[in-house]
Amino acid sequence: MRITKIAIHIVELTSHVAYRMAGGKACETVESVVVRLETDEGLTGWGEVCPIPRYLPAYARGVPPAVEELAPVLLGADPLGPEALMGRCEVALPGHPYAKSAIDMALWDLTGKAAGMPLYRLLGGRQTDSVPLYHSISCIAPDEMARIAETVYADDIRQFQVKLGADGDWQADVARIRAVREAVGPGPLIFADWNCGATALTAIRTARAIRDLDVMLEQPCESLDACAQVRNATGCAMKIDEGAHDMATLLEAHRLGCMDVVAVKFSKFGGVSAARRARDLCLHLGTMVMIEDVWGSDIATAAAAHLAVATAPAYLLNACDLSGYVTPRIAPDGPVRKRGRLAPSDRPGLGVSPEPDTLGDAVAVYA
Ligand code: 0XW
Ligand code: MG
């Protein structure tokens, strides 16, 4: 089988609820990049990457030039066996993991379709029917955040991400955490996410003010050293997100003792292949994982569902139904939240059929 055509589509995704984070980061309407690979045997593979502006060293408009650079490697190549082809892409263009993420995802979709198997089977096999989800709550007024928490609690969500720091008021952040904990009661998991936006001092003061509550902290500061300082000073369990994006940073966070949980996001690491390797290292280290991406719609959500069900449930904290936060749905047959959980399709590959009308015309085609 040979790749005969690469097409890139850009779809604007708008959040159902205005979504704000620390440091002025927001994703009210963001561009998601869809990569479509076509083959001489009539199969089509789909990949998606949706970088939130200012979130990571990644931007949507950076994807098409990277794909153009890699087109000579991809066109005419055998797509089956994504890691082999991605290795050649790494030689041709080192780095740019977020752009490669969409290509690698599309190669896995093709490999699954060629094998006639759902992706989870190629990733080692299904270890569970469905996986738990968390719900991420935008950094807004504490009572509004509590209302959102109550609504999704009624849909059986038991893990809550409370965004902090958007207004630079640490006492408001204390109120946010308290309001959500009060709304959901003592059992559910809460992670308080600063998205790198706090100093160690602010994060320590905030965490000490809620020390009577059971709350996990998430990526309070930009550097892993500062995150470790917060972890040591507060004794609170910590999730590392932005700071762990390759094998070296995973090992560093582990060495510093600040990584109780880590977000394995496809576009941080470079796709499904790289995320699977990262997951395996985390399980070896004894770190629990969340399988997701930065943002996106049905294609990225489907990929997360497949890798998540192929992950040992004891080490899988959750996955994220990104498509549930945004409109439009790129592929209405993609996996959706059901009773607080997510399950992948049993159709071959990712099992998603993107809508041509939603994708619109390709912004670039290589053939
Ligand atoms: C990347 N986000 C903003 C979207 C996902 O829901 C999780 C969240 C994060 O930073 O963890
Ligand atoms: Mg985070």
Image (tube, grey):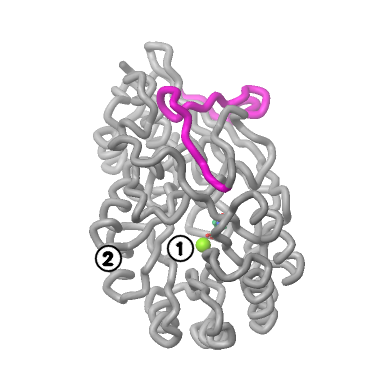
Residue 341 is a magenta residue: yes
For marks 1 and 2 on the same chain, the one whose residue lies earlier in the sequence: 1
As measured in the structure, the alpha-carbon distance from the residue carrying label 1 to the one carrying label 2 is: 14 Å
Quadrant placement of the C terminus:
top left
Secondary structure beneath dot 2 equals helix
Quadrant placement of the N terminus:
top left
State the residue position of label 2: 251
Image position, residue 173 (x, y; %):
65, 77
Q: Which of 182 and 221 is in front in this view?
A: 182
Decide if residue 126 is in sight here.
Answer: yes
Image position, residue 244 (x, y; %):
38, 62
Q: In the figure, is residue 18 to the left or right of 69?
A: right
Magenta range is: 340-367
State the residue position of label 1: 242
Which residue corresponds to the image point at 37% horizontal and 51% vertical from the top-left?
269
Q: Which mark is residue 79?
A: none
Q: In the figure, is residue 4 to the left or right of 170?
A: left
Q: Which of 140 and 150 is in front in this view?
A: 150
Callout 1: few (<14), some (14-19), or many (20+) C-alpha neighbours within 10 Å?
many
Which residue corresponds to the image point at 47% horizontal and 72% vertical from the top-left?
222
Q: Residue 331 lies in what quarter of the image?
A: top right
The verdict on label 1 being within 8 Å of ligand 2 is yes
Which residue corresponds to the image point at 44% horizontal and 43% vertical from the top-left?
99
Are dots 1 and 2 in contact, CB under 8 Å? Answer: no
Image position, residue 63 (x, y; %):
49, 42
Image position, residue 220 (x, y; %):
50, 74
